[in-house]
Amino acid sequence: MKRGVQVLAVILGLVVLAIVGVSFFVSANSFRPELQNRLSAALGRPVTVGDLKLSILSGGVTANDLSIAEDPAFGGAPFLHAGALKISVDLYPLIFSKQLNIRGLTIEEPQVALLQSPSGEWNYSTLGGKPDRSPTPPPAPPAGGSGAQSLAMSADLVQIKGGQFSIGRTGGTQKPLALNNVNLEVRNFSAAAAFPFSLSADVAGGGHVELQGTAGPMDQANAELTPVSLSWRVTQLNLATALAGTVTGMAGMVSLEGQGTSQAGVMNLQGKLQADGLKAVQNGSPSGRPVQFDFALTNDLRKHAGQLRQGTLHIGAATANLSGTYAEQNAATVLNMKFAGAKMPIPDLEAALPAFGVILPSGSKLEGGTASLDFTVTGPADRSTAAGTASLDNTRLTGFDLGGKMGGAIQSLAGIKSGPNTDIQTVGANIRMTPEGIVIDNLRLIAPSIGDLAGAGTISPANALDFKMTASVKTSGVAAALSGVPVSFFVQGTAQNPVFKPDVQDLARRQAQKLLQSDQAQKFLKGNAGKAASGILGRFLGGGQTQNQTQSQPQKE
Protein backbone atom coordinates (compact mmCIF):
# COMPACT_ATOMS: atom_id res chain seq x y z
CA MET A 1 0.00 0.00 0.00
CA LYS A 2 2.77 2.37 0.98
CA ARG A 3 4.66 1.59 -2.23
CA GLY A 4 1.53 2.31 -4.35
CA VAL A 5 1.20 5.74 -2.79
CA GLN A 6 4.83 6.47 -3.55
CA VAL A 7 4.40 5.48 -7.21
CA LEU A 8 1.33 7.71 -7.51
CA ALA A 9 3.20 10.61 -5.98
CA VAL A 10 6.05 10.15 -8.45
CA ILE A 11 3.61 10.13 -11.40
CA LEU A 12 1.89 13.28 -10.18
CA GLY A 13 5.25 14.93 -9.71
CA LEU A 14 6.27 14.08 -13.27
CA VAL A 15 3.00 15.51 -14.60
CA VAL A 16 3.56 18.73 -12.68
CA LEU A 17 7.14 18.92 -13.96
CA ALA A 18 5.88 18.33 -17.52
CA ILE A 19 3.35 21.09 -17.21
CA VAL A 20 5.89 23.49 -15.76
CA GLY A 21 8.47 22.45 -18.32
CA VAL A 22 6.17 22.88 -21.28
CA SER A 23 5.01 26.23 -19.95
CA PHE A 24 8.63 27.29 -19.55
CA PHE A 25 10.11 25.98 -22.78
CA VAL A 26 7.09 26.50 -25.13
CA SER A 27 6.28 30.18 -25.67
CA ALA A 28 2.71 30.38 -26.98
CA ASN A 29 3.30 33.96 -28.06
CA SER A 30 5.88 32.77 -30.57
CA PHE A 31 3.00 31.31 -32.59
CA ARG A 32 1.11 34.63 -32.75
CA PRO A 33 2.55 36.08 -36.01
CA GLU A 34 1.91 32.87 -37.91
CA LEU A 35 -1.56 32.53 -36.37
CA GLN A 36 -2.46 36.06 -37.47
CA ASN A 37 -1.16 35.39 -41.00
CA ARG A 38 -3.07 32.15 -41.37
CA LEU A 39 -6.34 33.66 -40.05
CA SER A 40 -5.88 36.69 -42.30
CA ALA A 41 -5.34 34.46 -45.31
CA ALA A 42 -8.40 32.34 -44.46
CA LEU A 43 -10.70 35.36 -44.02
CA GLY A 44 -9.19 37.57 -46.70
CA ARG A 45 -8.86 40.42 -44.18
CA PRO A 46 -6.28 41.50 -41.61
CA VAL A 47 -6.72 39.72 -38.28
CA THR A 48 -5.07 40.89 -35.07
CA VAL A 49 -4.65 38.56 -32.10
CA GLY A 50 -3.56 39.67 -28.62
CA ASP A 51 -0.96 38.04 -26.37
CA LEU A 52 -1.20 34.24 -26.31
CA LYS A 53 -1.02 32.23 -23.11
CA LEU A 54 -0.70 28.46 -22.86
CA SER A 55 -2.98 26.55 -20.49
CA ILE A 56 -1.96 22.89 -20.37
CA LEU A 57 -4.76 21.89 -17.98
CA SER A 58 -7.44 23.20 -20.28
CA GLY A 59 -5.64 21.92 -23.34
CA GLY A 60 -5.52 25.21 -25.17
CA VAL A 61 -4.17 28.68 -25.80
CA THR A 62 -5.93 31.90 -24.92
CA ALA A 63 -5.64 35.39 -26.35
CA ASN A 64 -6.77 38.55 -24.61
CA ASP A 65 -7.95 40.26 -27.80
CA LEU A 66 -9.20 39.49 -31.31
CA SER A 67 -10.02 41.92 -34.11
CA ILE A 68 -11.12 41.26 -37.70
CA ALA A 69 -10.87 44.22 -40.04
CA GLU A 70 -13.85 45.65 -41.90
CA ASP A 71 -14.27 45.64 -45.67
CA PRO A 72 -12.75 49.03 -46.64
CA ALA A 73 -15.92 49.89 -48.57
CA PHE A 74 -17.81 49.96 -45.26
CA GLY A 75 -15.47 52.13 -43.18
CA GLY A 76 -12.60 51.71 -40.79
CA ALA A 77 -14.25 50.28 -37.66
CA PRO A 78 -13.58 46.55 -37.02
CA PHE A 79 -16.01 44.03 -38.46
CA LEU A 80 -15.55 41.93 -35.32
CA HIS A 81 -13.93 42.68 -31.99
CA ALA A 82 -13.74 40.32 -29.04
CA GLY A 83 -12.03 40.56 -25.68
CA ALA A 84 -11.05 36.90 -25.55
CA LEU A 85 -10.16 34.05 -27.93
CA LYS A 86 -9.70 30.44 -26.86
CA ILE A 87 -7.84 28.00 -29.11
CA SER A 88 -8.10 24.24 -28.57
CA VAL A 89 -4.87 22.43 -29.51
CA ASP A 90 -3.40 18.94 -29.71
CA LEU A 91 -1.18 18.62 -26.63
CA TYR A 92 0.98 15.71 -27.82
CA PRO A 93 2.58 17.49 -30.82
CA LEU A 94 2.73 20.67 -28.79
CA ILE A 95 4.74 19.03 -25.99
CA PHE A 96 6.99 16.77 -28.03
CA SER A 97 7.29 18.59 -31.38
CA LYS A 98 6.54 22.17 -30.42
CA GLN A 99 3.88 22.12 -33.13
CA LEU A 100 0.59 23.96 -32.65
CA ASN A 101 -2.27 22.03 -34.27
CA ILE A 102 -5.49 24.02 -33.87
CA ARG A 103 -8.61 21.89 -33.36
CA GLY A 104 -11.11 24.55 -32.46
CA LEU A 105 -11.75 28.26 -31.83
CA THR A 106 -14.04 29.91 -29.30
CA ILE A 107 -14.67 33.64 -29.61
CA GLU A 108 -16.16 35.04 -26.43
CA GLU A 109 -18.57 38.00 -26.36
CA PRO A 110 -17.66 39.48 -29.73
CA GLN A 111 -19.23 42.62 -31.12
CA VAL A 112 -20.12 42.22 -34.80
CA ALA A 113 -21.57 44.82 -37.19
CA LEU A 114 -23.43 43.41 -40.22
CA LEU A 115 -23.97 46.24 -42.71
CA GLN A 116 -25.73 46.49 -46.07
CA SER A 117 -24.87 49.20 -48.59
CA PRO A 118 -27.51 51.16 -50.57
CA SER A 119 -26.72 48.90 -53.55
CA GLY A 120 -27.63 45.82 -51.49
CA GLU A 121 -24.12 44.46 -50.84
CA TRP A 122 -23.28 43.11 -47.37
CA ASN A 123 -20.00 43.71 -45.58
CA TYR A 124 -19.62 40.00 -44.76
CA SER A 125 -19.83 38.98 -48.44
CA THR A 126 -16.06 39.44 -48.92
CA LEU A 127 -15.13 37.26 -45.95
CA GLY A 128 -13.11 34.28 -47.11
CA GLY A 129 -12.36 35.91 -50.43
CA LYS A 130 -8.92 36.02 -51.95
CA PRO A 131 -6.80 38.76 -50.38
CA ASP A 132 -5.37 41.57 -52.48
CA ARG A 133 -1.87 40.30 -51.83
CA SER A 134 -0.21 37.31 -50.26
CA PRO A 135 0.02 37.30 -46.47
CA THR A 136 3.24 38.63 -45.00
CA PRO A 137 5.63 35.76 -44.36
CA PRO A 138 5.96 34.88 -40.69
CA PRO A 139 8.87 36.57 -38.98
CA ALA A 140 11.85 34.61 -37.74
CA PRO A 141 11.62 33.44 -34.15
CA PRO A 142 13.15 35.77 -31.58
CA ALA A 143 16.70 35.24 -30.39
CA GLY A 144 16.86 32.49 -27.86
CA GLY A 145 13.61 31.04 -29.10
CA SER A 146 12.80 27.49 -29.84
CA GLY A 147 13.63 27.53 -33.53
CA ALA A 148 11.33 27.08 -36.50
CA GLN A 149 7.75 26.14 -35.61
CA SER A 150 4.92 24.99 -37.90
CA LEU A 151 1.21 25.70 -37.70
CA ALA A 152 -1.26 23.05 -38.84
CA MET A 153 -4.78 24.44 -38.85
CA SER A 154 -8.05 22.55 -38.64
CA ALA A 155 -11.36 23.47 -37.04
CA ASP A 156 -13.37 20.63 -35.64
CA LEU A 157 -15.33 23.19 -33.65
CA VAL A 158 -15.75 26.95 -34.08
CA GLN A 159 -17.87 28.78 -31.52
CA ILE A 160 -19.14 32.26 -30.77
CA LYS A 161 -20.45 32.71 -27.25
CA GLY A 162 -22.43 35.65 -25.89
CA GLY A 163 -22.01 37.77 -29.00
CA GLN A 164 -23.65 41.11 -29.75
CA PHE A 165 -24.62 41.61 -33.40
CA SER A 166 -26.08 44.69 -35.05
CA ILE A 167 -27.75 44.51 -38.48
CA GLY A 168 -28.27 47.74 -40.38
CA ARG A 169 -27.72 49.83 -43.50
CA THR A 170 -25.09 52.39 -44.33
CA GLY A 171 -25.89 55.96 -45.24
CA GLY A 172 -29.38 56.01 -43.72
CA THR A 173 -31.28 56.85 -40.56
CA GLN A 174 -32.67 53.37 -40.02
CA LYS A 175 -32.04 52.04 -36.53
CA PRO A 176 -30.02 48.78 -36.67
CA LEU A 177 -31.57 45.56 -35.47
CA ALA A 178 -29.69 44.39 -32.36
CA LEU A 179 -29.15 40.72 -31.49
CA ASN A 180 -27.90 39.86 -28.00
CA ASN A 181 -26.51 36.66 -26.50
CA VAL A 182 -25.61 35.29 -29.93
CA ASN A 183 -24.32 31.73 -29.76
CA LEU A 184 -22.97 30.17 -32.96
CA GLU A 185 -21.52 26.69 -33.33
CA VAL A 186 -19.84 25.29 -36.46
CA ARG A 187 -18.54 21.71 -36.52
CA ASN A 188 -16.05 20.10 -38.90
CA PHE A 189 -15.45 23.39 -40.65
CA SER A 190 -13.85 23.21 -44.06
CA ALA A 191 -13.96 25.89 -46.71
CA ALA A 192 -14.05 23.18 -49.39
CA ALA A 193 -16.98 21.14 -48.05
CA ALA A 194 -20.37 21.48 -46.38
CA PHE A 195 -20.38 21.82 -42.60
CA PRO A 196 -23.19 21.86 -40.00
CA PHE A 197 -24.00 24.95 -37.95
CA SER A 198 -26.48 26.18 -35.36
CA LEU A 199 -27.24 29.64 -34.03
CA SER A 200 -29.40 31.13 -31.30
CA ALA A 201 -29.90 34.78 -30.36
CA ASP A 202 -32.19 37.16 -28.50
CA VAL A 203 -33.64 40.13 -30.36
CA ALA A 204 -33.31 43.40 -28.47
CA GLY A 205 -36.80 44.59 -27.62
CA GLY A 206 -38.31 41.11 -27.69
CA GLY A 207 -37.86 37.87 -29.59
CA HIS A 208 -35.74 34.73 -29.79
CA VAL A 209 -34.15 33.27 -32.96
CA GLU A 210 -32.92 29.73 -33.61
CA LEU A 211 -31.24 28.55 -36.85
CA GLN A 212 -29.67 25.25 -37.79
CA GLY A 213 -28.52 23.61 -40.99
CA THR A 214 -25.51 23.14 -43.23
CA ALA A 215 -23.41 25.55 -45.27
CA GLY A 216 -20.60 25.21 -47.78
CA PRO A 217 -18.45 24.87 -49.66
CA MET A 218 -17.57 28.53 -49.21
CA ASP A 219 -17.92 30.77 -52.25
CA GLN A 220 -14.50 32.40 -52.61
CA ALA A 221 -15.79 35.43 -54.52
CA ASN A 222 -18.84 36.23 -52.39
CA ALA A 223 -19.57 34.56 -49.05
CA GLU A 224 -23.23 35.55 -49.40
CA LEU A 225 -23.52 33.08 -52.30
CA THR A 226 -22.30 30.09 -50.25
CA PRO A 227 -24.80 27.19 -50.55
CA VAL A 228 -26.98 26.87 -47.44
CA SER A 229 -29.72 24.54 -46.25
CA LEU A 230 -31.41 25.64 -43.05
CA SER A 231 -34.47 25.66 -40.85
CA TRP A 232 -35.44 28.43 -38.46
CA ARG A 233 -37.75 29.26 -35.61
CA VAL A 234 -38.54 32.74 -34.28
CA THR A 235 -40.68 33.22 -31.18
CA GLN A 236 -42.28 36.30 -29.60
CA LEU A 237 -40.68 38.76 -32.00
CA ASN A 238 -41.67 42.37 -31.34
CA LEU A 239 -42.57 43.50 -34.86
CA ALA A 240 -42.35 47.23 -34.10
CA THR A 241 -38.75 46.82 -32.89
CA ALA A 242 -37.69 44.47 -35.68
CA LEU A 243 -39.04 46.77 -38.43
CA ALA A 244 -38.15 50.10 -36.83
CA GLY A 245 -37.18 52.52 -39.59
CA THR A 246 -38.11 50.04 -42.33
CA VAL A 247 -41.91 49.81 -42.35
CA THR A 248 -43.78 52.53 -40.48
CA GLY A 249 -46.72 51.68 -38.27
CA MET A 250 -46.50 47.89 -38.11
CA ALA A 251 -46.63 46.26 -34.68
CA GLY A 252 -47.52 43.00 -32.94
CA MET A 253 -45.91 39.86 -31.54
CA VAL A 254 -44.83 37.40 -34.24
CA SER A 255 -43.85 33.74 -34.25
CA LEU A 256 -42.26 32.28 -37.38
CA GLU A 257 -40.93 28.93 -38.52
CA GLY A 258 -39.81 27.50 -41.82
CA GLN A 259 -37.00 26.12 -43.94
CA GLY A 260 -35.09 27.01 -47.03
CA THR A 261 -32.14 26.46 -49.33
CA SER A 262 -29.72 28.71 -51.18
CA GLN A 263 -27.91 27.48 -54.27
CA ALA A 264 -26.06 29.40 -57.00
CA GLY A 265 -27.21 32.70 -55.54
CA VAL A 266 -30.93 31.81 -55.52
CA MET A 267 -32.65 31.33 -52.18
CA ASN A 268 -35.97 29.49 -51.80
CA LEU A 269 -37.82 29.87 -48.52
CA GLN A 270 -41.15 28.63 -47.22
CA GLY A 271 -42.72 28.97 -43.83
CA LYS A 272 -45.57 30.02 -41.57
CA LEU A 273 -46.04 33.19 -39.57
CA GLN A 274 -48.52 34.00 -36.81
CA ALA A 275 -49.05 37.52 -35.50
CA ASP A 276 -50.90 38.35 -32.30
CA GLY A 277 -52.10 41.92 -31.77
CA LEU A 278 -51.11 42.77 -35.35
CA LYS A 279 -51.23 46.38 -36.51
CA ALA A 280 -50.56 46.44 -40.25
CA VAL A 281 -50.97 50.15 -41.03
CA GLN A 282 -50.01 53.33 -39.24
CA ASN A 283 -53.58 54.48 -38.53
CA GLY A 284 -54.72 51.01 -37.45
CA SER A 285 -55.12 49.45 -34.02
CA PRO A 286 -54.20 45.95 -32.75
CA SER A 287 -56.17 43.04 -34.13
CA GLY A 288 -58.37 41.17 -31.68
CA ARG A 289 -57.75 37.93 -33.52
CA PRO A 290 -54.54 36.09 -34.54
CA VAL A 291 -53.44 36.55 -38.15
CA GLN A 292 -51.61 33.71 -39.90
CA PHE A 293 -49.60 33.87 -43.11
CA ASP A 294 -48.23 30.95 -45.14
CA PHE A 295 -45.59 31.88 -47.68
CA ALA A 296 -43.15 30.63 -50.30
CA LEU A 297 -40.67 32.97 -51.95
CA THR A 298 -37.65 32.99 -54.23
CA ASN A 299 -34.91 35.57 -53.65
CA ASP A 300 -32.10 36.38 -56.08
CA LEU A 301 -29.08 37.29 -53.95
CA ARG A 302 -27.23 38.85 -56.88
CA LYS A 303 -30.09 41.06 -58.06
CA HIS A 304 -31.32 41.78 -54.51
CA ALA A 305 -34.84 41.07 -55.68
CA GLY A 306 -37.34 38.29 -55.39
CA GLN A 307 -40.82 36.92 -55.92
CA LEU A 308 -43.45 35.98 -53.37
CA ARG A 309 -44.72 32.94 -55.20
CA GLN A 310 -47.43 32.10 -52.72
CA GLY A 311 -48.79 33.96 -49.73
CA THR A 312 -52.01 33.00 -48.00
CA LEU A 313 -53.46 35.14 -45.23
CA HIS A 314 -55.69 33.33 -42.72
CA ILE A 315 -58.01 35.10 -40.27
CA GLY A 316 -60.22 32.36 -38.92
CA ALA A 317 -62.00 30.84 -41.92
CA ALA A 318 -61.34 33.94 -44.04
CA THR A 319 -58.47 33.67 -46.52
CA ALA A 320 -56.83 36.15 -48.90
CA ASN A 321 -53.90 35.76 -51.27
CA LEU A 322 -50.81 37.94 -51.60
CA SER A 323 -48.28 37.50 -54.42
CA GLY A 324 -45.91 39.59 -56.49
CA THR A 325 -42.36 40.89 -56.61
CA TYR A 326 -40.00 43.01 -54.53
CA ALA A 327 -36.64 44.60 -55.22
CA GLU A 328 -34.11 46.70 -53.34
CA GLN A 329 -33.75 50.15 -54.90
CA ASN A 330 -31.90 53.07 -53.34
CA ALA A 331 -31.88 51.59 -49.84
CA ALA A 332 -35.62 50.81 -50.01
CA THR A 333 -37.59 47.65 -50.73
CA VAL A 334 -39.94 48.40 -53.63
CA LEU A 335 -43.10 46.28 -53.84
CA ASN A 336 -45.34 45.25 -56.72
CA MET A 337 -47.91 42.98 -55.12
CA LYS A 338 -51.45 41.74 -55.67
CA PHE A 339 -53.70 41.25 -52.62
CA ALA A 340 -57.14 39.69 -53.14
CA GLY A 341 -59.83 37.80 -51.26
CA ALA A 342 -63.32 36.77 -52.38
CA LYS A 343 -66.43 36.28 -50.24
CA MET A 344 -64.56 36.16 -46.94
CA PRO A 345 -66.90 35.58 -43.97
CA ILE A 346 -67.24 38.89 -42.12
CA PRO A 347 -67.66 37.33 -38.62
CA ASP A 348 -64.09 35.95 -38.93
CA LEU A 349 -62.72 39.24 -40.25
CA GLU A 350 -64.51 41.64 -37.93
CA ALA A 351 -62.07 41.51 -35.00
CA ALA A 352 -59.06 41.97 -37.29
CA LEU A 353 -60.39 44.89 -39.37
CA PRO A 354 -58.85 47.62 -37.12
CA ALA A 355 -55.38 46.19 -37.82
CA PHE A 356 -55.78 47.21 -41.48
CA GLY A 357 -57.16 50.67 -40.70
CA VAL A 358 -60.86 49.77 -41.04
CA ILE A 359 -62.55 51.64 -38.18
CA LEU A 360 -66.25 51.18 -37.43
CA PRO A 361 -68.43 53.74 -35.62
CA SER A 362 -68.09 53.57 -31.86
CA GLY A 363 -70.21 50.83 -30.30
CA SER A 364 -71.04 49.17 -33.61
CA LYS A 365 -70.26 45.74 -34.99
CA LEU A 366 -70.62 43.89 -38.28
CA GLU A 367 -72.63 40.66 -38.21
CA GLY A 368 -72.98 38.14 -41.03
CA GLY A 369 -72.29 38.54 -44.71
CA THR A 370 -69.13 38.42 -46.77
CA ALA A 371 -66.34 40.78 -47.82
CA SER A 372 -64.38 40.87 -51.09
CA LEU A 373 -61.33 42.90 -52.01
CA ASP A 374 -58.88 43.23 -54.86
CA PHE A 375 -55.86 45.53 -54.39
CA THR A 376 -52.53 46.27 -56.02
CA VAL A 377 -49.74 47.33 -53.63
CA THR A 378 -46.88 49.29 -55.19
CA GLY A 379 -43.97 51.49 -54.13
CA PRO A 380 -41.42 51.46 -51.29
CA ALA A 381 -42.49 49.25 -48.40
CA ASP A 382 -42.40 52.09 -45.87
CA ARG A 383 -44.66 54.36 -47.97
CA SER A 384 -46.47 52.05 -50.35
CA THR A 385 -49.75 52.71 -52.15
CA ALA A 386 -52.65 50.24 -52.16
CA ALA A 387 -55.32 50.81 -54.80
CA GLY A 388 -58.30 48.67 -55.74
CA THR A 389 -61.86 47.76 -54.85
CA ALA A 390 -63.60 46.51 -51.71
CA SER A 391 -67.18 45.44 -51.02
CA LEU A 392 -69.40 44.05 -48.28
CA ASP A 393 -72.55 42.04 -49.02
CA ASN A 394 -75.59 41.03 -46.95
CA THR A 395 -74.29 42.20 -43.58
CA ARG A 396 -75.70 44.13 -40.63
CA LEU A 397 -74.10 47.02 -38.78
CA THR A 398 -75.45 46.50 -35.27
CA GLY A 399 -75.45 49.25 -32.67
CA PHE A 400 -75.53 52.00 -35.31
CA ASP A 401 -78.71 53.65 -36.61
CA LEU A 402 -77.55 55.17 -39.87
CA GLY A 403 -80.96 56.67 -40.61
CA GLY A 404 -81.19 58.33 -37.21
CA LYS A 405 -77.55 59.50 -37.28
CA MET A 406 -78.19 61.29 -40.56
CA GLY A 407 -80.22 63.89 -38.63
CA GLY A 408 -83.80 65.12 -38.73
CA ALA A 409 -83.47 67.29 -41.83
CA ILE A 410 -81.89 64.62 -44.03
CA GLN A 411 -84.02 61.86 -42.54
CA SER A 412 -87.34 63.64 -43.15
CA LEU A 413 -86.42 64.88 -46.61
CA ALA A 414 -85.22 61.49 -47.80
CA GLY A 415 -87.98 59.51 -46.08
CA ILE A 416 -85.42 57.40 -44.21
CA LYS A 417 -86.58 55.05 -41.46
CA SER A 418 -84.82 54.81 -38.10
CA GLY A 419 -83.83 51.59 -36.37
CA PRO A 420 -81.29 50.31 -33.84
CA ASN A 421 -79.29 48.57 -36.59
CA THR A 422 -78.49 49.14 -40.24
CA ASP A 423 -78.98 46.28 -42.67
CA ILE A 424 -76.70 46.52 -45.69
CA GLN A 425 -77.51 44.77 -48.94
CA THR A 426 -74.22 45.84 -50.48
CA VAL A 427 -71.59 48.54 -50.14
CA GLY A 428 -68.63 48.94 -52.47
CA ALA A 429 -66.07 51.50 -53.54
CA ASN A 430 -62.80 52.20 -55.30
CA ILE A 431 -60.16 52.83 -52.64
CA ARG A 432 -56.67 54.30 -52.75
CA MET A 433 -54.58 54.14 -49.56
CA THR A 434 -51.35 56.11 -49.12
CA PRO A 435 -49.39 57.38 -46.08
CA GLU A 436 -51.22 60.71 -46.61
CA GLY A 437 -54.65 59.10 -46.16
CA ILE A 438 -57.41 57.21 -47.96
CA VAL A 439 -59.30 58.39 -51.04
CA ILE A 440 -62.63 56.69 -51.77
CA ASP A 441 -64.45 57.06 -55.09
CA ASN A 442 -67.61 55.54 -56.56
CA LEU A 443 -68.90 54.71 -53.10
CA ARG A 444 -72.34 53.09 -53.22
CA LEU A 445 -74.39 51.79 -50.32
CA ILE A 446 -77.70 49.98 -50.76
CA ALA A 447 -79.63 49.51 -47.50
CA PRO A 448 -83.32 48.48 -47.40
CA SER A 449 -84.24 51.06 -44.74
CA ILE A 450 -82.37 53.90 -46.43
CA GLY A 451 -82.23 53.33 -50.15
CA ASP A 452 -79.35 54.03 -52.47
CA LEU A 453 -76.49 56.22 -51.18
CA ALA A 454 -73.61 57.28 -53.40
CA GLY A 455 -70.64 59.61 -53.16
CA ALA A 456 -66.92 60.01 -52.58
CA GLY A 457 -64.52 61.43 -50.02
CA THR A 458 -61.37 61.04 -47.98
CA ILE A 459 -60.22 59.66 -44.65
CA SER A 460 -57.17 61.33 -43.09
CA PRO A 461 -54.43 59.44 -41.21
CA ALA A 462 -56.20 60.61 -38.02
CA ASN A 463 -59.46 59.00 -39.29
CA ALA A 464 -61.12 62.38 -40.02
CA LEU A 465 -63.92 62.07 -42.59
CA ASP A 466 -64.68 64.42 -45.48
CA PHE A 467 -67.38 62.97 -47.76
CA LYS A 468 -70.00 64.38 -50.14
CA MET A 469 -72.96 61.98 -50.48
CA THR A 470 -76.42 61.79 -52.03
CA ALA A 471 -79.39 59.67 -50.98
CA SER A 472 -82.24 58.75 -53.31
CA VAL A 473 -85.50 60.39 -52.14
CA LYS A 474 -88.40 58.21 -51.01
CA THR A 475 -92.03 58.90 -51.94
CA SER A 476 -93.59 59.18 -48.50
CA GLY A 477 -94.04 61.90 -45.92
CA VAL A 478 -92.36 65.25 -46.52
CA ALA A 479 -90.19 63.70 -49.21
CA ALA A 480 -93.19 63.01 -51.48
CA ALA A 481 -92.96 66.54 -52.87
CA LEU A 482 -89.33 65.94 -53.75
CA SER A 483 -89.82 62.57 -55.41
CA GLY A 484 -86.92 61.88 -57.76
CA VAL A 485 -84.67 64.55 -56.27
CA PRO A 486 -81.52 63.13 -54.59
CA VAL A 487 -80.85 64.51 -51.11
CA SER A 488 -77.27 65.74 -50.75
CA PHE A 489 -75.36 65.74 -47.47
CA PHE A 490 -71.87 65.82 -46.01
CA VAL A 491 -70.24 63.25 -43.73
CA GLN A 492 -67.64 64.73 -41.40
CA GLY A 493 -66.29 64.01 -37.91
CA THR A 494 -64.31 60.80 -37.48
CA ALA A 495 -64.75 57.17 -38.41
CA GLN A 496 -65.59 56.44 -34.78
CA ASN A 497 -68.10 59.31 -34.55
CA PRO A 498 -69.37 60.40 -37.99
CA VAL A 499 -71.36 63.63 -38.29
CA PHE A 500 -74.00 64.07 -41.03
CA LYS A 501 -74.90 67.54 -42.33
CA PRO A 502 -77.41 68.39 -45.11
CA ASP A 503 -76.19 70.26 -48.18
CA VAL A 504 -78.99 72.86 -48.11
CA GLN A 505 -77.76 74.87 -51.08
CA ASP A 506 -77.46 71.82 -53.31
CA LEU A 507 -80.89 70.61 -52.21
CA ALA A 508 -82.48 73.99 -53.02
CA ARG A 509 -80.75 74.07 -56.38
CA ARG A 510 -81.96 70.60 -57.33
CA GLN A 511 -85.54 71.38 -56.24
CA ALA A 512 -85.57 74.67 -58.15
CA GLN A 513 -84.32 72.93 -61.27
CA LYS A 514 -87.10 70.38 -60.98
CA LEU A 515 -89.76 73.05 -60.49
CA LEU A 516 -88.51 75.04 -63.50
CA GLN A 517 -88.88 71.95 -65.67
CA SER A 518 -92.54 71.42 -64.70
CA ASP A 519 -95.38 72.28 -67.15
CA GLN A 520 -96.75 75.03 -64.90
CA ALA A 521 -93.34 76.67 -64.64
CA GLN A 522 -92.82 76.57 -68.40
CA LYS A 523 -96.15 78.33 -69.04
CA PHE A 524 -95.27 81.00 -66.49
CA LEU A 525 -91.82 81.56 -67.95
CA LYS A 526 -93.26 82.34 -71.40
CA GLY A 527 -94.49 85.70 -70.08
CA ASN A 528 -92.28 88.78 -69.60
CA ALA A 529 -92.36 88.50 -65.81
CA GLY A 530 -91.50 84.85 -66.14
CA LYS A 531 -88.52 85.65 -68.35
CA ALA A 532 -87.16 88.06 -65.75
CA ALA A 533 -87.69 85.51 -62.98
CA SER A 534 -86.07 82.85 -65.13
CA GLY A 535 -82.92 84.95 -65.51
CA ILE A 536 -82.69 85.45 -61.76
CA LEU A 537 -83.21 81.74 -61.08
CA GLY A 538 -80.69 80.85 -63.76
CA ARG A 539 -78.04 82.95 -62.06
CA PHE A 540 -78.98 81.40 -58.70
CA LEU A 541 -78.54 77.95 -60.17
CA GLY A 542 -75.00 78.69 -61.25
CA GLY A 543 -75.23 81.21 -64.11
CA GLY A 544 -76.86 78.77 -66.53
CA GLN A 545 -79.99 79.40 -68.60
CA THR A 546 -83.31 77.68 -68.30
CA GLN A 547 -84.61 75.50 -71.07
CA ASN A 548 -87.24 78.21 -71.92
CA GLN A 549 -84.56 80.90 -72.27
CA THR A 550 -82.45 78.81 -74.55
CA GLN A 551 -85.33 78.02 -76.87
CA SER A 552 -86.68 81.59 -77.00
CA GLN A 553 -83.43 83.34 -77.96
CA PRO A 554 -83.23 84.28 -81.66
CA GLN A 555 -80.36 82.85 -83.59
CA LYS A 556 -77.69 85.24 -84.73
CA GLU A 557 -76.84 85.30 -88.41
Image (tube, rainbow, N blue to C red):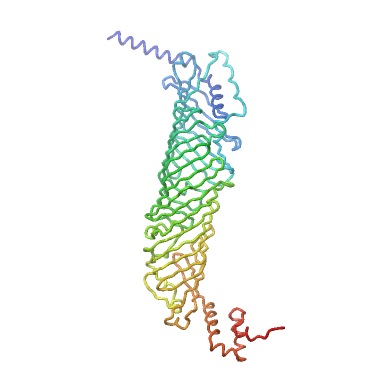
Task: Tell me residue 286's x, y (percent).
Answer: 42, 55
Who is closer to the viewer here, 159 or 132? 132
Position above or below: 89 against 278: above
Residue 355, percent across and down?
Answer: 44, 56
Q: Give above or below for 181 relative to 19.
A: below
Residue at the extreme top of the image, as rendered: 3
Q: Quadrant of the N terminus?
A: top left
Q: Quadrant for residue 365, please give it.
A: bottom left
Image position of 260 (left or right of 173): left
Rendered residue at 62%/85% (across/down): 551
Q: Is residue 261 left or right of residue 144?
A: left
141 over 359 or under it: above or below: above
Please state, as top left, top right, bottom left or bottom right, where the C terminus lies in the image. bottom right
Residue at the limit of the structure toward the front, as seen here: 557
Horizontally, residue 512 falls left or right of residue 321, namely right
- Nearer to the camera, 373 or 287: 373
**Residue nearest the viewer, comparing 347 with 506:** 347
Give the percent coordinates (x, y) of residue 311: 45, 49
Residue occupying the far right of the picture: 557
Note whether 14 is above or below 156 in the view shown: above
Q: Residue 269: give x, y in percent of width and height.
A: 46, 42
Residue at screen point 55% across, 50% down:
334
The number of numbered discs placed on residues in the rendered structure image is: 0
Front residue of 250/108: it is 250
